[in-house]
């Protein structure tokens, strides 16, 4: 009986769908028929107008002709010259209409005999159908006559069809609604009871039962089976819930990825970390083979090997990734079931050790770089001293001995500079450096740096220009460290700008920041080296950098000093054309603006950047020509010398 009513309801729905489809077809048929009528009418009116224009004398008033004829037939008529200029129009003054040379129907008529188009008219603000015909007047003048009608008739007919279809659909729906509601209520009432009991089960109440219907049918069978199942699963569900909560707590606390498979290799469980590492969705992976959810063949292979040998195994996997490779450690072990002789599956724990391997590589590279940088001056000093010791007094002149000693002294200075820079960089990175937090004008360290390095630029015949704002470029920071930043960047530009080049140092102000740009016309930096020039001892042109006396630590110091002042350091470069280093520091408020009173000591009420971990004070490091600070001769440019 229920199936019958379901069929009746389905039939009612089918009636509504059929009415809708028929309505759409009738609407399209009506639209096509009406458009055909419009086109036939326009063709006839165009032919009539064409004959009238062709027979009219040259001095005839064509505007009067189209006005009278258009008013009689209720159609807009237009006469257009071959150039596109409107000669006459039944509804608008020809002078108010634009050129019609590009209208599709005009183009078709001039190319052949007739042209037709249906489009939206911007002049009348409605959709219209056009029909045009070319005609030649006495004397050889070629014109195009055009007739057009709005779609008001079409819209009226379509509105009637839509209203009829809508009314029929509503009536059909109302007719089918009454039996549908009755049938739905009869089916839904017992199902609601089943749902309420199921919700009670979900809340932990396993004592609820479904009332059996009066009539034995499918719903009655469902209620009986549901009550039987509730009694049998009560204890089992409690046990399963307890075990699931324990397992969920264990897996949620893991920072490693975990994948468990059954004896056939199908996934039983995958935590969120494993889903992220394997680049898959853990919720949709349950029940699938491992090879179907990840492209990492090593995971599939180690699980297959563990299932086959029933022995634990470990493997390390390197995956190409951006910006650096990712390294995963895989630890697989078999799962034991209730029967120890049978395999219940296997589990693999995935640990991302990419950062650990990266730090190990950084440590190795740093040790190798430091060893190499220290070895170079030490080797030179040793060679010079051995030469002096092994040479008899009469074999070397006093000038030669003095030159050897000066070279050894220069290498000793270079060795001292490298060690001092390493200690300075170590203190800055470990937050042991104490930065004075003073209100200062950034133009002051800039002027000091330019004054100290101007002579070096002149020696290389490099043009050095400075652009400073008229207003105070006020920042909060350590003037000596900020001067070291300017020294390093400016010395770096001088070092890698060829003879005859130019360097421009610019200080900019905006509402929130103070900008410092060092722009040179030097050798530039290749794109693949730009992300690494701030690394310690990294050089693009190693031989040239050492020859110029750089330590390879300048840009690393600049980066950390800028970051310690809450700023940002960026670089833009075109290989062979030049490089621009830009420093952006937060603009500081003056003491007067903060207090609303007179100017006070800028050291007042300015907290330090951070408290040092120890009492170690980073020594003041001067730079520039003739100084022993790390800035002169170490300024890391495109090659980070």
Image (cartoon, helix red, strand yellow):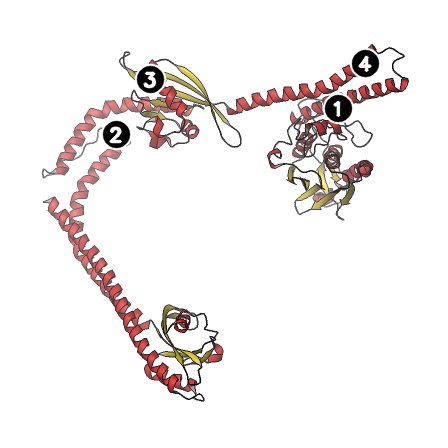
Residue at image mark 4: 387
In the picture as drawn, the residue positioned furthest to the front comes out as: 140
- 1 and 3 marks in contact (CB < 8 Å): no
Which disc number belongs to residue 417?
A: 1
**First reached walking from the N terminus: tag 3 or tag 2:** 2
Instruction: Say which label, 4 or 2, has the lower sequence index.
Output: 2
Circle 2 — which element?
Answer: loop
Label 1: how many Cα within 10 Å (few below 14, some 14–19, many 20+): many
- Mark 2 or mark 1, which has the lower sequence index? 2
Q: Which residue is drawn at 87% across and 15% down?
A: 396
Within the image, what quadrant is residue 590 found in? top right
- Mark 3 lies on a secondary structure that is helix
Residue 431: image x %, image y %?
A: 66, 26
Quadrant assignment, res 202: top left
Going from the N terminus, do you reach mark 4 or mark 3 first? 3
Q: Find residue 307 and name its label.
A: 3
Q: Nearer the viewer, residue 613 or 94?
A: 94
Instruction: Quadrant for residue 521, please give it.
Output: top right
Within 10 Å of disc 2 (Cα), the crowding (few <14, some 14-19, many 20+) is few
Note whether 410 is above or below 499 in the view shown. Answer: above
Camera-side residue of 615 and 499: 499
């Amino acid at each position: 009986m229920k199936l019958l009513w379901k069929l009746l309801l389905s039939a009612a729905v089918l009636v509504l769908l059929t009415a809708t489809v028929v309505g759409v077809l009738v609407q399209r048929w009506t639209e096509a028929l009406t458009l055909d009528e419009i086109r036939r009418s326009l063709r006839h009116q165009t032919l009539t107008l064409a004959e009238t224009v062709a027979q009219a004398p040259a001095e005839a008033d064509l505007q009067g002709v189209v006005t009278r004829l258009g008013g009689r037939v209720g159609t807009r008529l237009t006469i257009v010259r071959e150039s596109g200029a409107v000669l006459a129009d039944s509804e608008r003054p020809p002078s108010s209409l634009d050129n019609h040379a590009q209208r599709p129907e005009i183009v078709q008529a001039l190319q052949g005999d007739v042209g037709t188009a249906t489009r939206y008219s911007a002049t009348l603000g409605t959709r219209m159908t056009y029909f045009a015909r070319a005609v030649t007047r006495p004397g050889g003048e070629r014109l195009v006559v055009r007739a057009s009608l709005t779609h008001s008739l079409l819209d009226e007919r379509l509105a009637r069809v839509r209203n009829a279809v809508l009314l029929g659909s509503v009536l059909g729906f109302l007719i089918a609604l009454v039996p549908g509601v009755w049938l739905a209520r009869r089916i839904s009432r017992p199902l609601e009871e089943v749902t309420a009991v199921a919700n009670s089960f979900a809340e932990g109440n396993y004592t609820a039962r479904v009332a059996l219907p009066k009539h034995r049918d499918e719903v009655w069978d469902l209620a009986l089976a549901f009550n039987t199942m509730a009694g049998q699963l009560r204890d089992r569900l409690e046990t399963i819930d307890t075990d699931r909560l324990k397992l969920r707590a264990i897996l949620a606390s893991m920072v490693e990825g975990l994948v468990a498979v059954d004896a056939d290799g199908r996934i039983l469980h995958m935590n969120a970390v494993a889903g992220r590492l394997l680049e898959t969705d853990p919720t949709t992976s349950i029940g699938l083979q491992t090879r179907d959810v990840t492209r990492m063949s090593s995971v599939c292979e180690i699980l297959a090997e563990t299932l086959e040998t029933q022995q634990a195994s470990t493997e390390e996997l390197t995956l190409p990734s951006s910006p650096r490779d990712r390294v995963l450690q895989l630890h697989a072990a078999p799962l034991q079931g209730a029967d120890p002789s049978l395999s219940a599956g296997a589990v693999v724990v995935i640990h991302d050790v990419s950062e650990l391997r990266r730090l190990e590589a950084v440590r190795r590279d740093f040790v190798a770089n430091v060893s190499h940088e220290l070895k170079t001056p030490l080797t030179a000093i040793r060679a010079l001293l051995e030469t002096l010791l092994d040479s008899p007094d009469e074999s070397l002149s006093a000038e030669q001995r003095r030159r050897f000693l000066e070279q050894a002294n220069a290498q000793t200075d270079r060795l001292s500079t490298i060690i001092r820079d390493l200690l300075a960089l170590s203190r800055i990175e470990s937050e042991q450096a104490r930065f004075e937090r003073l209100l200062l004008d950034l133009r002051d360290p800039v002027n000091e740096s330019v004054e100290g390095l101007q002579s070096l630029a002149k020696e290389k015949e490099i043009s050095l220009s400075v652009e400073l704002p008229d207003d105070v470029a006020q920042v909060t920071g350590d003037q000596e460290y900020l001067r070291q930043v300017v020294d390093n960047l400016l010395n770096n530009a001088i070092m890698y700008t060829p003879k005859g080049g130019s360097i421009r140092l610019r200080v900019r102000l905006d509402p929130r920041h103070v900008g410092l740009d060092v722009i040179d016309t030097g050798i530039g930096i290749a794109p693949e080296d730009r992300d690494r020039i701030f690394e310690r001892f990294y050089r693009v042109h190693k031989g040239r950098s050492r020859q110029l006396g750089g330590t390879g630590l300048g840009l690393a110091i600049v980066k950390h000093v800028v970051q310690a002042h809450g700023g940002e350091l960026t670089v833009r470069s075109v290989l062979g054309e030049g490089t621009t280093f830009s420093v952006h520091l937060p603009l500081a408020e003056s003491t007067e603006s903060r207090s609303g009173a007179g100017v006070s000591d800028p050291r007042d009420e300015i907290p330090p950047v951070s408290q040092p971990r120890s009492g170690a004070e980073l020594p003041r490091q001067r730079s520039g020509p003739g100084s022993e600070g790390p800035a002169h001769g170490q300024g890391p440019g495109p090659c980070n010398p």
